Amino acid sequence: MDREDSVPTADRFVLQRQLLLGVGKTDLLGTLASLRALPGMRSAVITTTNRLVVEYDASQIQIDQVVELLETSGIPIRGGYWQRYCLRWYRFVDKNTADNAHSTSSHCCNKPPKGY
């Protein structure tokens, strides 16, 4: 059985992300409820090390929507080079995953690009 066929369709575009937060767990209770209410959000939890771990369907939601909700709630994301790098990587993978989820054409490795 092909691995792609063994993954349920609903789980093919589910991604897990971690964000370092600048506040403690007690400040986030209302925001966690808002995060969990977003369409496509599977789970949102805070670890003991102030990491927000979210799991969502990238065909419905992107990391920018999570970051925007945190910013509007007054929850700062810790800066730093590594966090900025991870956010850029998350955006790239989210966009690629969403594009694949909404693509109507099938892929074929033997098909040359159009124009050749």
Image: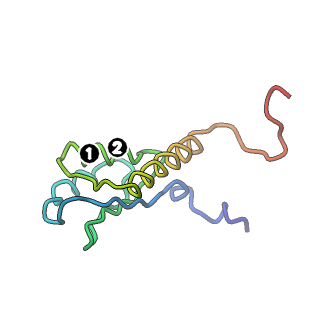
Q: Residue at x 18, y 66 (%)?
A: 25
- From this view, report whether residue 102 is shown above or below residue 75: above
27 on left or right of 110: left
By what rule are the colours in the image chosen? rainbow
Query: Residue reaching furthest top?
Result: 115
Q: What amino acid type is highlighted by mark number 1? A: Leu
Q: Residue at x 13, y 65 (%)?
A: 26
- Which disc number belongs to residue 69? 1
Q: Residue at x 18, y 59 (%)?
A: 28
Q: What amino acid type is highlighted by mark number 2? A: Gln
Give neighbour class at mark 2: few <14, some 14-19, many 20+ (Cα, 10 Å). few
69 on left or right of 4: left
Q: Residue at x 52, y 53 (%)?
A: 13
64 on left or right of 24: right
The x, y position of residue 103, in whole percent, is 61, 39
In terms of depth relative to the viewer, which is nearer, 78 or 91? 78
Marks 2 and 1, Cα distance to the nearest angstrom?
Answer: 6 Å
The x, y position of residue 43, in whole percent, is 34, 61
- Residue 74 visible to the viewer: yes
Quadrant placement of the N terminus = bottom right
In terms of depth relative to the viewer, which is nearer, 75 or 57? 75
Dot 2 lies on which element?
helix
Q: Are marks 2 and 1 in contact (CB under 8 Å)?
A: yes
The x, y position of residue 106, in whole percent, is 71, 42
Dot 1 lies on which element?
helix
Q: Mark 2 highlights which residue?
A: 65
